[in-house]
Image (spheres, helix red, strand yellow):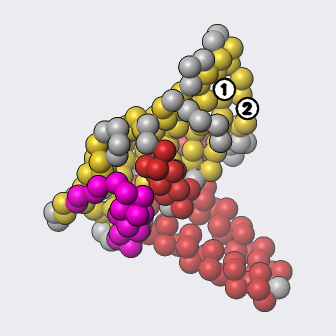
Amino acid sequence: MQAYDQIEYSNVALWFNREQIQELVVLIMEQGMNVAWRETTKYFTLSVQTNENRHRLTFKRIGQQYRLRDRHYKIKDNRFEKILHHFIEQVKGHAIITFFTGDQLVVQKIRYGEAERIIKITGSQREIVFEKECSVTMDDVMAALKRTDAEARIPALRMELDSELSVLHEAIKAEDKDLILRTKEKLSHLHQEMLLLEL
């Protein structure tokens, strides 16, 4: 990746478990940044001091999960940016990342840890570099908007996804083609549900 003057993260939505938060703290400390934390029954807050400025990451506790959502970060420290990007990929989170240089912007929309769209803007010219195909229908969106249990369903759905991925891994090792097909179909339905719940 080329060097950028500044990288801005917005609309960040990440789900962590406790072990992943501990891993985040360790990685930040290993990179030579100062980190302090505070925990209450509802929140886990990290304060990270980079060479340029201080960043606050506040995780809301929901059951056994911790949610970092709707935060905005302007990052000039390459170490912190790499760590944040790593966790967005690892926990299959969401974010909009804007890379700034003197004469160009690159905007990357991340959903479930993967690029959904990448746009390059130079002056008045706008170029879509990459766009992932969407499979959500309007009926699906309307059904999702009527749901009231999204916050409670998402952690359970994540566990179901992890479980089905384990089943798929074992099916691939055993070369069980029927089980592979059934598991992939179930994963597709679970993924679709997750997309709708996190609209």
The overriding secondary structure of the stretch rendered in magenta is helix
Q: Residue 129 has which mark?
A: 2
- Cα distance between the residues tagged 2 and 1: 7 Å
Of residue 134 and residue 145, the one placed in the foreground of this image is 134
The image quadrant that residue 130 belongs to is top right
Of all residues, the one furthest to the left in this rendering is 40
Q: Secondary structure at mark 1?
A: strand
The image quadrant that residue 162 belongs to is bottom right
Q: Residue 120 has which mark?
A: 1
Q: Which residues are magenta?
A: 17-37
Residue 194 visible within the image: no
Label 1 packing within 10 angstroms: few (<14), some (14-19), many (20+)? some
Indicate yes or no whether the magenta region holds residue 35: yes
Q: Is residue 82 left or right of residue 62?
A: right
> What residue sits 23% from the left and 58% below the top?
36
Identity, as a three-letter code, of the amino acid under mark 1:
Lys
Contact (CB < 8 A) between labels 2 and 1? yes
> What residue sits 22% from the left and 60% below the top?
37
Of all residues, the one furthest to the bottom in this rendering is 174
Above or below residue 62? Residue 19 is: below
Indicate yes or no whether the magenta region holds residue 22: yes
